[in-house]
Amino acid sequence: MHQPTLRVIKVLNLLANSPEKLSLSLISKQLNIPPSTLFPILQTLQNEHFILCDNANKSYDLDYKVLELAQKIKNENTALELIKKYMKNIRDLTQQTCQLGILKGGEVLYLEKFDASSDVQIKSFVGASYPAYATALGKALLEKKSKKELAQIYTQPFITMTQNTTKNIDDLYTKITQIKKDKIAIESGELNPQIECMAIGIEYKKEILAAISIAYPLFYSSKEFKEKNKAILLQAKDHIQKALKLYFPELKGI
């Protein structure tokens, strides 16, 4: 364990749980840290606005930076809860499995899932990761990437999941270029030969923050089916993006 870092954490925890401001000597006594070691820690935390010194009695309390970080964490967690409400609505309207993912390197990480209410269930798991090039979620997340950026992400040959899996960088770039025209990503049997997915990217400050998809058995697929559910997804995208912009102006991620 890194002792200098641990001392900083102990100082912040002590001040956070103290009902009153504490002097250097009291902090030193309670944490068993020599005053000569403690003073530069307090000085640095004060300079960075994590703690505040009351010059009148030389006592310390938490400053706005700690509160700012806490608020950001609260906002990000609440933002996820907001998105989950829309996902549940998407599941209910489409009657299909709804999933949420973010991009981690070249893979899509599944953060949330609402199962379809029908007897047909999609076998996917929250916390699982799959190659982004083989999923609708992943392609939606990669939509704004240039061919050069894709080549930097994927330095190894693509793994073939099924006979329909995207073959290479050129194939992938062609597909994400099509997303810009269609406004939605569709993947048929690339990860699972029996499953089709439709996905939308959630944009925030011109960046794709996450993606939401519906997944369903391939035999459900038809022009009418896809048009109906595309409209549901695009409407949800618009509502989510407006809500994030309105309620979470400083959001950094979900």
Image (cartoon, rainbow, N blue to C red):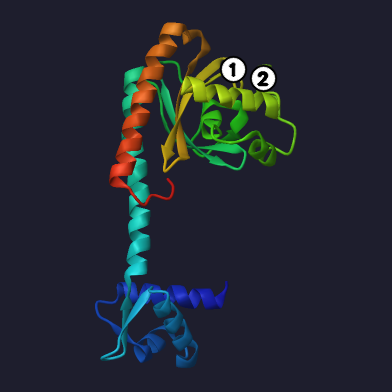
Tell me which residue sits at (62%, 23%) in the image. Answer: 174
Tell me which residue sits at (31%, 26%) in the image. Answer: 89
Q: Which residue is denoted by mark 1 in the rendering?
A: 189
Residue 19: x, y in percent? 24, 77
Q: Is residue 11 above or below residue 150?
A: below
Q: Is residue 180 above or below residue 78?
A: above
| Residue 190 horizontal side relative to residue 212, left or right | right
Q: Secondary structure at mark 1?
A: loop
| Residue 36 horizontal side relative to residue 16, left or right | right
Residue 96: x, y in percent? 40, 19
Residue 70: x, y in percent? 35, 60
Q: Which residue is denoted by mark 2 in the rendering?
A: 162
Label 2 or label 1, whichever comes before in sequence order: 2
When asked about the image quadrant of residue 247, the answer is top left
Q: Nearer the viewer, residue 17 or 220?
A: 220
Do the numbered discs 2 and 1 sit on residues whose CB atoms are within 8 Å? yes
Tell me which residue sits at (38%, 73%) in the image. Answer: 50
Q: Amino acid at mark 2?
A: Thr
Point out which mark residue 180 bears: none
Q: Is residue 143 above or below residue 225?
A: below
Q: Amino acid at mark 1?
A: Gly
